[in-house]
Amino acid sequence: MRRIATQILNPVAVALVATLMIAGCASKRVPNSAADLGLAGNAAPGSTQDFTVNVGDRIFFDTDSSSIRPDAQATLTKQAQWLNRYGRYAITIEGHADERGTREYNLALGARRAAATRDFLVSRGVAANRMKTISYGKERPVATCDAPSCWSQNRRAVTVLNGAGS
Amino acid sequence: MKHFLKTMLLAVAFTAGLAGLVRPAWALVEIDVNKGNVAPLPIAITDFLSGDTMGTQISDIVAADLKRSGLFAPIDKSAFIEKVSNPDAAPRFDDWKVINAQALVTGRVTQEVDGKLKAEFRLWDVFAGQQLVGQQYFANKGNYRRVAHIIADAIYERLTGEKGYFDTRIVYIDESGPKDNRIKRLAIMDQDGANQRYLSSGKALAITPRFSPNRQEITYMSYESGQPRVYLLQIETGQRELVGNFPGMTFAPRFSPDGQKVIMSLLRDDGNSNIFTMDLRSRNTTRLTTADAIDTSPSYSPDGSQITFTSDRGGGTGHSQIYVMGADGSNQHRISFGNGSYSTPVWSPRGDLIAFTKQTGGEFQIGVMRTDGSGERILSSGFSEEGPTWAPNGRVIMFFSEPAGSGGPKLHTIDLTGRNEQEVPTPNFASDPAWSPLLE
């Protein structure tokens, strides 16, 4: 039986992807978070803005992979600490894929990424019954250039806080 | 269009007049569709006689269908010498030989006392000097395009020996709006792009529509309930219905060839996806695969005995491959072994081939292979190409293609020979085409 969530990553591959992301962000980055919109610093602790700005609401994946990368593990660990502190939020984890795959396969891949993200948060103490998952496959890209710099931003899982907050 | 099929269209082969006088058909003129580089057959399609523009409209549709097939070269009407004034009489074959017309189509459109349209046509073998086909059809005036497609199918069939595919429709996804906020609507149109209309509002994301063998309903996936689920839609009434009551996402639906089942993927809680069927009458569900993997994009063989699907159970990155199993889930085995990843297998209506999407070397390709995986042939390659669907005669494949920087996908057709790639006209960007069976 093959494990989905945890695999040893090739450090060279990770480094390459990271480089491409940085190169792409310099020119084509779209505003993905409150931080990009210049809202950092105003977030009330425990607000969705606090979560998005100070914790980070999304992680990224390697091509055709649902393994949680080391950088994503760090983000999810911070997410879990925050979510455990602010237990009033129900959580939806959205799984997404880049456009370099076929539609149905990418729906399944996005679902697998969402499940891997959920499972990691569970392993860090977030109650499973607070979380649901949904896959958007490649149907909801955030970066729209036809280049690797955009694809790497689209291969993502986004932790969305539902409106149960105060 | 409702109930058009059985009650308003009647085809009658001519038994009187010239048709009865000619020798038994032994055509000199014919097309071998299996040849890789066949020269299109020069054919003269005259304006059908009528008191209005209807005759010309019908003959123009017939000519456009035949031309798009790549197998026929309709001759410019300005080159015609004989002006056909009596379509019941034999033409002056010498006049048509001079302009090198191998085949000639004549016809007439009249209005019956009940208001119905009567369309007659004759197909002539110019060099043999004989009639090959003579038929007449009755239809409501609003259905004149269908009458033209049926005539084109009759000509195609007589000259190629293969069933036509012009009297068919396409369901697909109309795409509008910016790429990061695309509106994706179900749409339907004739195979030539005419009579386009929407089947969903676009409020919810809808994808992957597929025709029922009865042509009256489609199955598709939509986010309309918030969660992605497989639905049925009655085309004429607009009635929608959720397929099954599964706990997780259902996707990648298709009908079984008898129309009694929908086969689809169901997401498991652990993130893997397996293939299930649901019987539409009994509502019983049957699980066909159990691998800890992504199993998706199932497609039945036309006899219903086998299923091809995509799976990444072989492991590794970029290793989705094509598998085949019995309709009961038995004997699951991989058939794709080329260099790259494979997905979206679709069984040919003739049963002998499987069309697929392949990713290799940073490109997407549309190809076909035999059902044991041998004889792989790539028909088209590009930046992004996906989602083959077969014309009902198994000679033409439609797919969607998005060149880099183009902003969105368009529908394309290509012959099984890899020749004659053409864009299908749609008002907006378009994806996920599914070809209907021949209408009836």
Image (tube, rainbow, N blue to C red):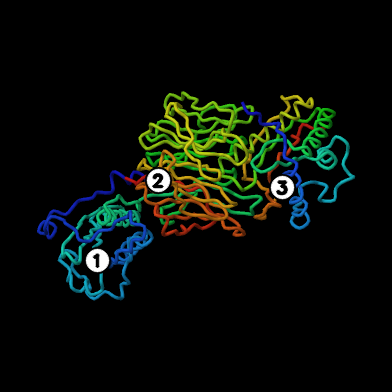
**Given the image, what chain letter belongs to the residue carrying mark 2?**
B
CA–CA distance between discs 3 and 1?
Answer: 58 Å
Residue B98 occupies which quadrant of the picture?
bottom left
Instruction: Tell which of B226 and A156 is nearer to you.
Output: A156
Q: Which amino acid does label 1 sit on?
A: Gln
Q: Kindly indicate whether the residues beneath marks 2 and 1 are on one polypeptide chain.
A: yes
Where is mark 3, residue-wise? A153
Of badges 3 and 2, nearer the viewer stands 3
Image quarter of the C terminus of chain B = top left
Where is mark 2, residue-wise? B436
Q: How far across and how far down the image is residue A70, in percent?
A: 78, 37
Q: What residue type is labelled 3?
A: Gln
Q: Residues within 10 Å of mark 3 (few under 14, many from 20)?
A: many
CA–CA distance between discs 2 and 1?
Answer: 31 Å
Instruction: Tell which of B127 and B213 is nearer to you.
Output: B127
State the residue at coordinates (51%, 30%).
Answer: B275
